[in-house]
Amino acid sequence: MRRQGHTPLEMFNNDTRHPSSSPPFESNLSPPIRMTVTQQRGVGLLEKYQISKLLTKCYGSVSNTALLRHRTARPDSDPEAIQTFYLKALHPALSRLVKKHPFLSVIPVDVDQPTAHFALLESYDLRDIVHVNPSFRYWEHLSDLIRGAVKYEFDHLRPNGLPMWSLQIDVHPDRPYECAMTLIVYHLIMDGRSVLVFWRDLLNELKMIGGGESQQQQPFVVACDPDAVVPPPYEERNPVLRASTALWGTKEDEAQMWQGDYEANRDPATAQCDTDVRQFKVDGDAWAKIVSTSKSHGVTPHAPIMIACVSAFAELYPGRVLRTMTAVNTRPLCNPPVPDDEFGNFFGVFFKFWRSAAAMHEKKSFWDQCIEYQNFVREHKTSAAAFTQNVLRPLESFPESFCRFWTDNLTKYALGRPGGIALSDLGILRTDAQSSEWTLEEIYFSQAAHMYTLAMGLNVISLPHGMFGTLCWHKGAVDPAKADRFGGLVAKKLEEIAGQ
């Protein structure tokens, strides 16, 4: 049932604050569009946290680039024919996803005001959000493709009737049975778990439907469930708060921790996120060995990835103190648990200091370190649930206090940021349906650099046959020669331990 008071409204370019007295927002579509939306709830704390990143220009987007094979050859070169080829396959699948997940139809309203809230689009045309690049050798320039995706900024201040996600499909005439399909999404509507569920659901639907079977005539419109309601935010889902968010380090650790290599631009008026990306992978027998050995030691593959990350850092920055940040899916930490496939922002973070990392590696075996880290994760995982309560709830006003949460770091730390490395691990992506029509060969998870906080971000996702990662950093924060080596070093250390 539709929530009382949330009635459909016809909007012109989504000017919701002053529909009668102010001119409509300009649209980047031509001609201007009319849209019917349903007003929804106000944004929650984690959603304000995401919006403030864009208001301060310190973040871009989240992306996933999937390298896919399809049994049916697509048209050669005509961009419109190529787009239609993929839309015929995607439309039935995405229609189901849009009805299942309300956040795929969400637009934010009044994002720079205390009244920030959501609205649901009644429908939209996939041709406006599925874009084709008809002649790009993506397999040779994968880092460039990913970099362009995470640097994309959705027009959150001047909505144009489109949802906060899109698909970019890169193809080349030399490979008529292959494509690189990139999901670009505003973190406001999807966290890491949501992204994993998006691909699982999409691939399952594609495999069940097959390729090129839709009889849909243009336009390729998808419609939200007319009774859909944006579900409540995380803080209203009764999170179990057993401990406070802490840094688990001394003041000396925080003073000595690696903040990056270069001083930040301390002028918020001119500073803007500029992300660089390198991708890497560990696949084949090496990854299979890591997964099986992890299981035999009672740890998940996340643990060896983290230890390889710390080991790579120790090699590049000997003697430095490293602080890592790990994101945690907090859906299971609510009472009752939030459904595992619900889109939204349900995460917390915890930190760990690694002191004298090189000396630590000399005293303990790789797998002993993995076991120790896994125990640390299990002990402190529930404290991640307190991040929203203890860090975000005290912020007094939106958007002012939330924006200062980022910009205050410019004066709080010697280099203008706390620094360290964030490891965002989506875990393994498994699909249920079996079909030879669509085959997922590789997938890379990435996101924009966090300009005011982290020095580097390590983003990984796994398939049964491999782990695929990206290293992201804000240009000007890290020595590019070291950043260039970092992802490869992580992969090398994982391959070395797999070979032992």
Image (spheres, helix red, strand yellow):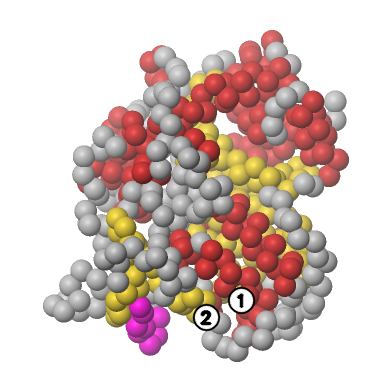
Q: Residue at x 49, y 45 (%)?
A: 338
Q: Residue 421: within the magenta?
A: no
Q: Residue at x 72, y 55 (%)?
A: 431
- Which element is circle 1 on? helix
The answer to whether any part of residue 355 appears in the image is: yes
Question: Picture coordinates of residue 353 (x, y %)?
Answer: 51, 21
The 10 Å Cα crowd at callout 2, few under 14, some 14 to 19, many 20 or more, is some
Question: Picture coordinates of residue 215 (x, y %)?
Answer: 67, 86
Q: Which residue is mark 2?
A: 221
Q: Which residue is mark 1?
A: 91
In the rendered image, which quarter contains the N terminus? bottom left
- Observer-nearest residue: 7 or 367? 7
The answer to whether any part of residue 315 appears in the image is: no
- In the current view of this chain or complex, which residue is farthest to the top? 363
Q: Residue 34: within the magenta?
A: yes
- In the current view of this chain or complex, which residue is farthest to the left? 21
Question: Picture coordinates of residue 460 (x, y %)?
Answer: 63, 44
- Observer-nearest residue: 7 or 135? 7
Question: Picture coordinates of residue 430 (x, y %)?
Answer: 71, 51
